[in-house]
Image (cartoon, rainbow, N blue to C red):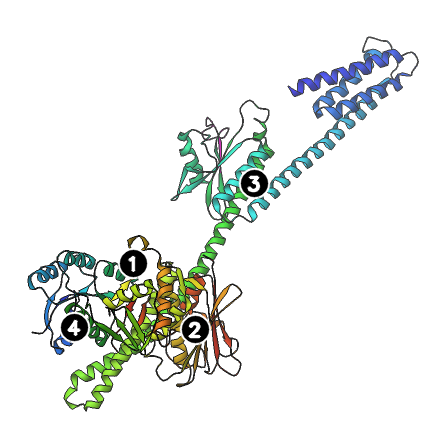
Amino acid sequence: MRSTRESLLAVAIVAIATIASVLFRDSLAPTNLAMLYLVGVVVVAMRCSRWISVTASFLSVAAFDFFCVPPYLTFAVSDYQYVFTFVGMLVVALVISTQTARLKDHAAQAAVREARTEALYRLSSKLAGETRVFEAARAAAALAEEVFGARVVMFLPEDGKLSFRRRTSDVLPVPPSEESIAQWVFDHGHKAGLRTDAHAEATALYLPLRGARETFGVLAVLPEIGSNMENRIFLPEQQQLLEVFASQTALAIERTLSQRSAEETRVHMQTEQMRSSLLSAMSHDLRTPLASITGAASTLRSQNDRLPLETKQELLESISDEAERLSRLVGNLLDMTRFESGGVELRRDFYPLEEIVGTVLQRMEPQLQGRTVTTDLAENLPMVFVDDVLIGQVLWNLLENAAKYTPPGSPLELAAFDEQEAAIIEVRDRGPGIPPGEEERIFEKFYRGKSVNIRGAGLGLPICRAIVQAHKGTIQALARAGGGTTFRISLPIQSA
Amino acid sequence: MKPLILIIEDDAQIRRFLRAALDAEGYRLQETVTAEEGLAQAAARQPDLILLDLGLPDRDGLEVIQKVREWGKIPILVLSARGQEKDKIAALDLGADDYVAKPFAVGELLARIRAALRRSIVRGDGAGSIVHFGPVEVDLEKRIVRVDGEDVHLTPNEYKLLQVLIQHAGKVLTQRQLLNEVWGPQHTEQAQYLRVYIAQLRRKLERNPARPKYLQTEPGVGYRLVSEE
């Protein structure tokens, strides 16, 4: 089609040159008329393909001989010097034809290269930030439709087998029966389907999305039947681009997957690390009281008659104390586990702070024996919207720590006041204080202050923080002027 | 004759130490392992108190409370796991008298048993009596409240709340139960009222309202009036 149009154009241009030459035949020397034909050849070479312009060159020489060189209307030549003119004219015309055609080819190739570079650049920038495999495939398919002017769908595997269900388009544009072709492409990593050696009768061309190590899916291309783009997709340079496109998409998917697996490995390692530190803390902290209990109980059982009454009493007390410690530990571990698995549901309501504080102090009387605990509750404290059991537990843990880590008999203070839309509760002690730099770390799980030599699973404070954070509040440890530590809880006051 | 206590508990070790402790106090005991057996024994022997574990193998302990309450007022003391406030409230609302959270010390259990038995003996709301706890003296007939011998004015709702607590002295009352008895069944969700009134009562009756000795909060469950020492 295109070539017919070009041939007609070439003939027309040679005809125009001939008509012009015949008109000027009497006033111009024939060698100058040859120039008119050369202009025609230049025009043809610029517009048409190489072979047409070469043909136009020969045609021009023939027409020149026939119409412009005497005797007219015959190919015979009276003066043999014109043979030089013919040869010169032909050589010039042919050189013009080939050179122009070559220039055009270069330009066309440059354009293709540019389009291709641009398409691949857009592909890589679209896929660069994508961390989800399916989204990457969807973006690549959309871009491919634009670049190739054809319908493009990508299919991804499901449980190791390619599936038409996992596809990037809403509707399935190919017959379901072609799933087996896609599967073959997926398995073998070779293209198949429309206009290929295998299954040329298919509605689509299937290409594998082949990465460096494996095939991630299949790309299906459906040219729009009857459009002028129908054949374009099958041009060698487009086919090549399509293949590069598919492999770039596969590489992007591969990168996404490897990033994800790296992240998973990291999380897994962290979990493992936590688990092992949990295990070591557990084995130590659970075994120690168990050992005391077992030891004391077995002593009582096997040596009962030989033990003085006083010793028996001591052993019994140690059993009871250690059991209590074990119970607290198990309780803390369970609480932490519940918090971490998201199994804690806040049962919030409006409570007067003094009620929560009062209840804790009253229940902790045995633990706080021998301590002066000064309470300083501001008048007219607003009600706080909290889970009273959990906030009570925070105060319990803080007071228990204070009792454990500060010298016996040193005073404790519990204060509550409101400050800028927040209810503040402070537990203050006059103990050794927290070494600078550890104020944050003491809230980490299984962290134990280096300088302290008291046993505990290192879970009390992390639980406090988890509870306070669940209430959208904050908890901090602050160094106290004059020595000691202030644990400061800030809870947002919510208007009813 | 010493009171008879029915134990419904599936764990052998726990039964063992309960037996030792209760035996030493001179109580008579009947031990059962399942809910079915427990219910049968409760009906047959009419114990003075039931010690009930909520986690039984055959049926939910809550069902046992329900069944027993269908025919009788035998005090029920629940042994519950720690941190299961929902279960405690459910048990109390169904009519259990009190609970002890596992693990517990025997001293605490014995105190609860004594309180429950005492309540069941003096049931019949003790009208005409004068009640003492700490510095507080309440004349239930004349509706007069004194602290350290001085009259204290209570609003009608405050007095009613105190009266309900006194009637059930020693027993935990859930928020729902208190709201129902003082304000009526349509107000059982308005726990905030209750807290405000409790705080006011504490201010009027307790020596140190910030560390209440008598009007105690059971976190997440309700309130209890502690009248002995």
Label 3 belongs to which residue?
A: A244
The stretch of residues the image draws in magenta is: A194-207
Counting labels gives 4
Disc nearest the viewer among 4 and 1: 1
Tell me the residue that label 4 is attached to. B18
Q: Is residue B2 visible?
A: yes
Where is residue A166 shown, x and y percent of the image? 43, 39
Callout 2 secondary element? loop
Q: Which residue is mark 2?
A: A447
Which residue type does callout 4 highlight?
Leu
Chain letter of the residue beneath label 1 in the structure image: B
Q: Nearer the viewer, mark 4 or mark 3?
A: 4
Pick the residue in front: A74 or B109: B109
Q: Indicate the amino acid at tag 3.
A: Val
Residue underneath mark 1 = B176
* Circle 1: residue type: Arg
Q: Quadrant of residue B35?
A: bottom left
Q: Quadrant of the C terminus of chain A?
A: bottom left
Same chain assignment for discs 4 and 1: yes
Q: Amino acid at mark 2?
A: Tyr
